[in-house]
Amino acid sequence: MLGKFRLGTICYYVADIARTEAFYRDVLGFEVKRMDDDGEGNAWLTAQTANGIELIFFKRDARPGDTPVVVFDLPDGGIDDVVSGLAAKGVTIVTPVSEAPGGWSADVADPDGHPISMYQTNELPRRAAGS
């Protein structure tokens, strides 16, 4: 089901946004942009790789192994239908479709519990056309 979508984002949960920003910018040489989507000072970071895969960084308590999270872009929308289809195949839904910066996301787990995420912008329909 996700095999037809491109990998768009790798999401990291980090303890310190400023430290992460300095590392990825000053040490690794990424152009890092600080974002403040919610208006309440909850900054997050974004950086682009040379092949167009986006790295994003959110401040959140995380245990080793919780991240990175691979995020598949859903360019045609329909996130509700994709998640429903995966659930029908017995996939564990970790986070149901919920609001994310600029759109919607959902998380599932592979058989070993590794997170797999999906994202679509809020400009696209949450259900596929004709469903």
Image (cartoon, rainbow, N blue to C red):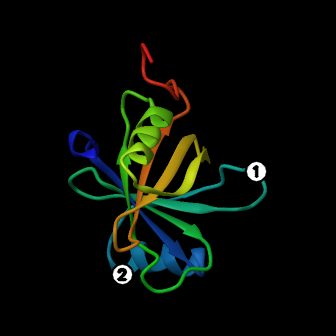
- In the figure, is residue 111 to the left or right of 22? left
Residue pushed farthest bottom?
Answer: 64
In percent of the image, x 28 and y 59: which residue is there?
Answer: 49
Which is more toward the observer, 112 or 69? 112
Which-is-in-front pick, marks 1 and 2? Answer: 1
Disc ID at residue 27: 2
In percent of the image, x 52 and y 47: which residue is there?
Answer: 105
- Tag 1 secondary structure: loop
- In the figure, is residue 103 to the left or right of 111? right
Q: Where is residue 11 in the image (x, y as percent from the top left)?
A: 44, 63
Q: Where is residue 103 in the image (x, y as percent from the top left)?
A: 56, 39
Q: Residue 55 appears in which quarter of the rendering?
A: bottom left
Residue pushed farthest right?
Answer: 40
Q: Which amino acid does label 1 sit on?
A: Gly
**Is disc 1 in contact with disc 2, using a CB cutoff of under 8 Å?**
no
Q: Quadrant location of the C terminus?
A: top left
On the image, numbered disc 1 is attached to which residue?
39
- In the figure, is residue 112 to the left or right of 46? left
Q: What residue type is labelled 2?
A: Val
Which is more toward the observer, 29 or 130? 130
